[in-house]
Amino acid sequence: MVGKWAGTGKRRTRGFFESGRVMLNGQLCEDGQVQVGRFDHVQVDEVILQNEVPRYIMLHKPKGVVSATTDLEHETVIDLIQEDWADQLHLAGRLDRFTSGLVILTNDSRYSESLTEPSNKVGKRYLVEVDGGIGPEVISAFEAGIWFAKEKVTTSPAAIEQLGPGKCRLTIYEGKHHQIKRMFAKFSLKVIALHREAIGELELSGELKEGEWIEIIPTPGQTGGIPEAG
Ligand code: URA
C-alpha cells in the first residue's frame, strides 16, 4: 500500500522517525535528525510513503518534436518515451522544434538544475549550419560574448570551431531562448540546421537513432562547466 506523508523537511521528520516504526531504505530508522532524500525509500508498518526511482534519460530528439511535456498540436519528447513513468519527467534544457540532438529528461530536479543553472557554466555543444559565410568578425564576437539587450546580459565566451564556410561546431554556456539563432542573427545569418551533440560531459550516444532514448547513470558532481584555463 502507498500512503501520504508530509515530505522530506527536517522539522517534519522529527518525532515521526522516533516512533520506531519507520523503515528507511529497508532498515529501521529511529534517528529524529535524519535527512530524507527525495529518492529514499520510506515505509511505516506496511505502508510505503515514498518509493520514487530516480530516472535520467538521454534522448535523441528528432526535428519537429517539441521540447515540452504536453502540446496540443505536435508530438513531444515525452510522447517518445512510452513508459508509465514518463509523465514524471521534466527537461534539463529545451531545444527548439526544428533543432535535433541531445535532450536530457529526469525526475531529479537537483540534477536538472546542475545542468541548467547559468552560474554552473555547463557547455552545450552544437553543430550549426547557416545560410552564409562565417567570417572572422563572427568568430571573434562569439569568443568575446554577445550582448542580448532583452535579458541585459553578455553571453559567456563561446568556443567556435569552423568546419566549412557556413558550418561550425559551437559551444555555449547559457540556454537563452533561441540563443544560437539570435547570436547569428546579429550578423544577418540565418541558422538552417542545428543539432546538439553534448551537454557538459554527456555526449549524445552514436548508438541512438532519432527518437530513441536510453537510461543513463550520471556521474555525481560532473556537470561539465567551462574547462579551467591553462
Ligand atoms: N539555440 C537555438 O537557437 N535553438 C536551440 O534549439 C538551441 C540553442
Image: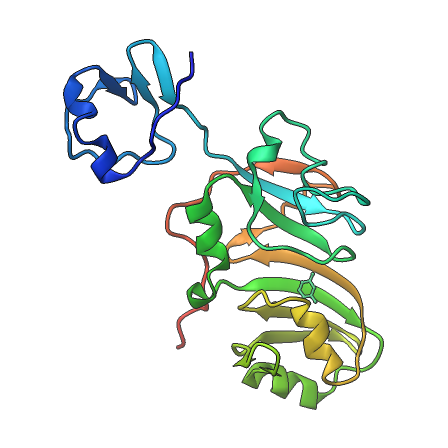
Instruction: Locate the C terminus by quadrant.
Output: bottom left
Q: Position of residue 81 (x, y in %)?
A: 67, 33
Q: Position of residue 174 (x, y in %)?
A: 54, 68
Instruction: Locate the N terminus by quadrant.
Output: top left
Q: Quadrant of ligand 1?
A: bottom right
Question: What residue is shown at x 70% (from left), y 75% (from top)?
Answer: 182
Question: What residue is shown at x 37% (from left), y 35% (from top)?
Answer: 38
Residue closer to the observer: 51 or 217: 51
Q: Is residue 39 left or right of residue 81?
A: left
Q: Position of residue 149 (x, y in %)?
A: 61, 83
Q: Quadrant of residue 59?
A: top right
Which residue reaches farthest top? Answer: 46
According to the image, what is the colour scheme of the structure?
A: rainbow
Q: Is residue 69 left or right of residue 65?
A: left
Q: Position of residue 183 (x, y in %)?
A: 68, 78
* Location of residue 133 with respect to 11 vertically, above or below: below
- Label count reads 0
Q: Is residue 22 left or right of residue 54?
A: left
Question: What residue is shown at x 21% (from left), y 25% (from top)?
Answer: 16
Which residue reaches farthest bottom? Answer: 137
Q: Is residue 66 left or right of residue 198?
A: right
Question: What residue is shown at x 41% (from left), y 24% (from top)?
Answer: 51
Q: Quadrant of residue 134?
A: bottom right
